[in-house]
Image (tube, rainbow, N blue to C red):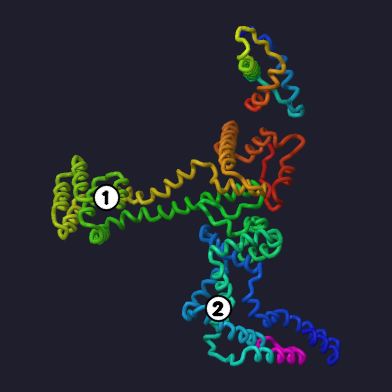
Amino acid sequence: MASHNYETPLKSSSFQHLVGTLSQRRHFTPSRSRYTPRSAQRTVTPHKRRALARRNSLARRRSNVFSATTPRDILRMLSRALAKNPVPSPAESESSERRHTPQTNSQKSQKTPRLSSNKRRTLKNDAKQRNSQSPGTDTSDANLTIQSIEAPRRAPQRLSDFFTPDGRRVSNIRDSLISEKRLENNIDQVQESALSTASSNRLIDLKNDEVPIFRIPLSDYETDDMDDGTPLQRHVATLNQYQSPIFNLGPDILEDEPSYSSRASRSRQSSLSSRLSELPSKRASLEILRRENTFPADPIQEFGEKAYNERELMEEISNFEPLLDDNLLENANEAVNSPVVDAPMDADSALEIPNDEDNGEILNKLKDSPFKKPKRRYSKSSTLVLPETNIRKLANSYSQKKIAGSVIEELTTASELFFKQIANDLSAFADHAHRKTIDTQDVVLLMKRQRKISEKKSLSSLMQQYLSREIAPPAIKRT
Amino acid sequence: MEQESELLSLNTLARILTLYFSSEKGTKITPSALELITQYLRIYSKEAVCRAYEEKKNSIMSSSENEDIVLELEDLENGIAAQLALDFS
């Protein structure tokens, strides 16, 4: 490259020389990679490794947080879809890639306009080198496009294959110990900002990000990026994250519900008969009986899980007897006593007895039953104010020392007390002001009460001290 | 009760309180609020004395029970002051 630069001023005018060198530079800087495509693809620099691992972790993070999709995802999907047709073995793809990547580069260079003779010469040189590198590059065009799209995409994928979860963990531990700080400050930021959605929160969060591998989410409620930023910000993030799994689930469930009643009453027979064919007949008939008689949802849930034998069935039916109509009872007994083949028919006849309107409500109630699980989970998790992992991360963000489990417990209780008191105080303040919503004023008053704000220290100074500048100051009414 | 209320007159209390009110706003206080504050102060001082007494009693339990317990300034300072301030903050 240097030799070309020296040649140009001798043969051309000064202006042309300027143009030539500029174009050369523009041309050469991307094409540098052409001379070391193999090495660039094969060698795994620590930066690259980190970037790849980070990207993987990003993908994983996205699976938890539904909304985060980048335009890159589309491209990635496209490339994967394209790659599906020719699926070469790793070795094959490597060899083919080696053959094809120079070709794509040559195509690219042909497209670029040749501004000067100098440049053409350099291109010829390039072509020579290329030919020496890769003889017999002519292949079919379709294959080539696939490869050219796919090659850069697949290379990271293959590299990521090297890092199986175990190996990745080991390598990253080492990596983090060696060069965490350095990487945090340059390459990761760039990579992440390019890869992730450019929401301000996340960008802020990424500054001091940990090693991605350590953040394998332990629970669904764990938030992945909350290591940086101010306490307020983090709190907001945690709240958002905390709500998301539950409240995203809720509406989806509820959407189906109203339509279900009408749809169910129409298609009940067919669906149930199909279900009957799946289930053992006696079980199914009992299930239908229960549905008709508005039994609580729980036995049905248990019903799917437990395996009932005939004796238990009979016992249960006898327990339900006072609730049953005579017709239903007859049908049930028929269903139980009759041979297996006849049972579905009886069950269907039992189905037809009550009218549909009653069933709509019942079925609505029953529809709720499968979704008791998330509710239970929610109540279980709400016994703690914050998940333990979140508290651990919060604590770790202020001190780099390790933290014992007992300390985390203590922190949990302390934070619970703290939040309780804050909530009580805020509600008391709002009550005092004859309001039902807690206002900014109330929070300001609370801080005044806690002596965080005094005459010597205003709220704005506190904000400057603790909050990052990106956060817009809350609108505070001056009374 | 009447005797106790005479210990701290409402006027004095109002005077003390208005010292700490911001002067430009001209905050006033109603007599009923003053009454309430006196009650609160009474509870506060009672609580302080009681806690100091308990502390003292626990500390000298071993030696002799019959002796009269005399509360001193140290008793107030050592054991209970911090907790009391926290509880009545």
Q: Pinpoint the chain carrying mark 2.
A: A
Give the residue pinned by disc 1: A359
Image quarter for residue A106? Answer: bottom right
Instruction: Specify whether A387 is left or right of B9.
Output: left
- The magenta-colored residue range is A110-126
Q: Is residue B89 magenta?
A: no
Give the residue pinned by disc 2: A150
- Where A78 sits versus A226, above or below? below
Residue at disc 2, secondary structure: helix
Instruction: Specify whether B69 is left or right of A352.
Output: right
Q: Amino acid at mark 2?
A: Glu
Q: Pinpoint the chain carrying mark 1.
A: A
Q: Nearer the viewer, residue A42 or A154?
A: A42
Q: Nearer the viewer, residue A376 or A33?
A: A33
Q: Amino acid at mark 1?
A: Asn
Looking at the image, is mark 1 or mark 2 nearer the viewer?
2
